[in-house]
Amino acid sequence: MGVFKNWVDSFKPGVEGFGKESTYAIEPELQNKNPDATGEKEALGKDEYSNATVAVQTDDGGVAFVPEKTGLKRSLGGRHIQFIALGGSIGTGLFIGSGSNLALGGPGSLMLGFIIVAIMIITTVFALGELAAVLPVTGAFSTYATRFIDPSWGFAMGWNYWLQWLVSLPLELTAAAIIITLWDTDVVVPQGVWIAIGLLIIILINFCGVRGYGEFEFVASFLKVIGCIGFIICAIVIDCGGTSSGYYMGAQGWHQPSGAFKNGFKGFCSVFITAAFAFAGTELVGLAAAETANPRKQLPKACKQVVFRVLLFYILSLFMITLIVSPDMDELNGTGQSNDPRASPFVIAIQMGGIRYLPKIFNAVILISSLSVGNASVYGASRTLLALAEQGLAPKFFRYIDRQGRPIPAVIVSLLFGLLGFLIYSSDPSTVFNWLLAISGLAAIFTWASVCLSHIRFRRAWKLQGNTLDMLPWASPLGEWGSIVGLVMNIIVVIASFYAGAFPIDEGEMSAQERADSFFNYMLSLPVAIVFFLGHKIYSRSRYVRLSEIDIHTGRRDPVSLEVLDQERAEDRAKPFYLKIVDFFV
């Protein structure tokens, strides 16, 4: 009974705890603005809250430092953040969705499209790393947009991002159920049972709090990383004729009758939506900053790892796919459903090598990836909804956090949308899931563009208020220009997606209804974002935030002195060159 009572009590309202950290110091520059602030070290409160002080900008423009109160627990350690960054978002978008891209655009369009989106995500994550290191606030993207751009844009981005993850959960659960039928070929166990089991697993993980999310992602990301590395090695052997057939494939995928750029410019433009879906979730590192023990040091490391992950797990693995798998193979189309694992080019490549049992083993990796991304979708949706409620942009009851640091109402609502997975029993499941995917299609791109713009305005406000880049805990290696490039590329991708939707590949053979469906499959998330933005703008009559009005201090956690930062940087510069390379990637 004692265990059960403790479990029931854990759902009661949490007491806002004070952070505990005895090594912080007040920046002299900020202390001058707030004479009451002291540099004395003081241990406060409970271990699980981890950090002690937070900056608050006062009405007169000064900065006060107060013990931070939070209901969330800072339970994510370095290894959790590292692996969330390394493999957290690797899922069906890469393993399955890339197959339809290859079939539509050919190997050239697939590689070029993914490289462009990879550059976009690298600029975004570097910008996000800088922002999250200095301002590890709940909600990250929507909060930055509200404070640095426009409250209405922050409202639109928050709800847009929430919708993106809501529809992701049923898609991943359905994909997991279909994957299992590759072993249970006679469908002895109904697919709905596997969807229910998958949903139950994700419910249990999320009711274990942020630590449960972190531990599951640590294990799942480790397995995904091993699976990707194993596939690359296997693909090299297959391509070079190292299998029992002894057939040397070379670059056969690039020399098919349809050409490297199949369907021309239209085929190239059709790649971006799925590529964005494949990379979506990389930005969760920034969202997790508010529940990270030491974001100042852990976030920069995690963000730098994204470069390694993008080059190895996305670009290199897809390049091996294009060498082996022909874009004209009927298998790439599967059953026409957007999340059908039978269309995975990874599994098709392994099958072409004639290696027994290995396709089923890799299907297990895809299954784990589906559950991992489904788990991440609940985390991303619930924390975004919590942040919106704390900003007054969602109903107040979503601010509820229990004693274990779980935003229970936000988690429950996000989990309920997993029931949409049972739409697999509808008369036309492929149409249903394609429309669900359309809701989130451009949502990730809007989020990335918003992060880049927030970073640009933060940098300019930071300098305008008399601060130097040396005072930042970590500065993006790409700087403000990296975010400008990222913002421009995001806009170009939206335009390209608009073109692909308005002028589909087979437009001459389509009816007016089919062309309209094609357009909204690509662009549905754009009018959704516009409705959110204009609706809030009309209701609140908010205006954009001027640079002189931007609050760059509230939310800074445990700011350290410039002398400490200079000492840490000097130690980094003194390292041998090979250690600098290792630190950049690891």
Image (cartoon, rainbow, N blue to C red):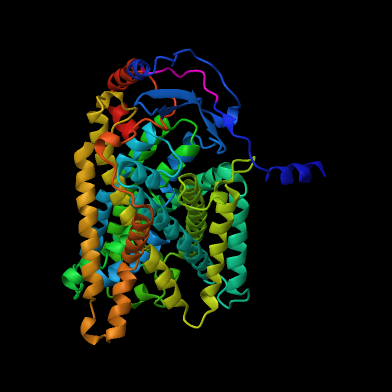
* Residue nearest the viewer, comparing 520 with 342: 520
Query: Taking 511 as reference, is 340 left or right?
Result: right
Please say whether residue 70 is one of the residues in the magenta stretch. no
Q: Quadrant of residue 566?
A: top left
The magenta segment is 20-27
* Residue nearest the viewer, comparing 406 with 543: 543
Q: Is residue 175 visible?
A: yes
Whole-percent x, y for residue 288 in the image: 46, 42
Q: Quadrant of the N terminus?
A: top right
Whole-percent x, y for residue 13 in the image: 65, 42
Point 23% across, 43% down: residue: 483
Point 34% across, 20% down: residue: 565
Whole-percent x, y for residue 321 in the image: 31, 62
Q: Quadrant of the C terminus?
A: top left
Q: Magenta segment, principal secondary structure?
A: loop
Give the tally of numbered discs: 0
Q: Quadrant of residue 149?
A: top left
* Residue nearest the viewer, comparing 402 with 164: 402
| Above or below, 118 relative to 135 | below
Whole-percent x, y for residue 486 in the image: 23, 48
* Residue nearest the viewer, comparing 430 with 109: 430
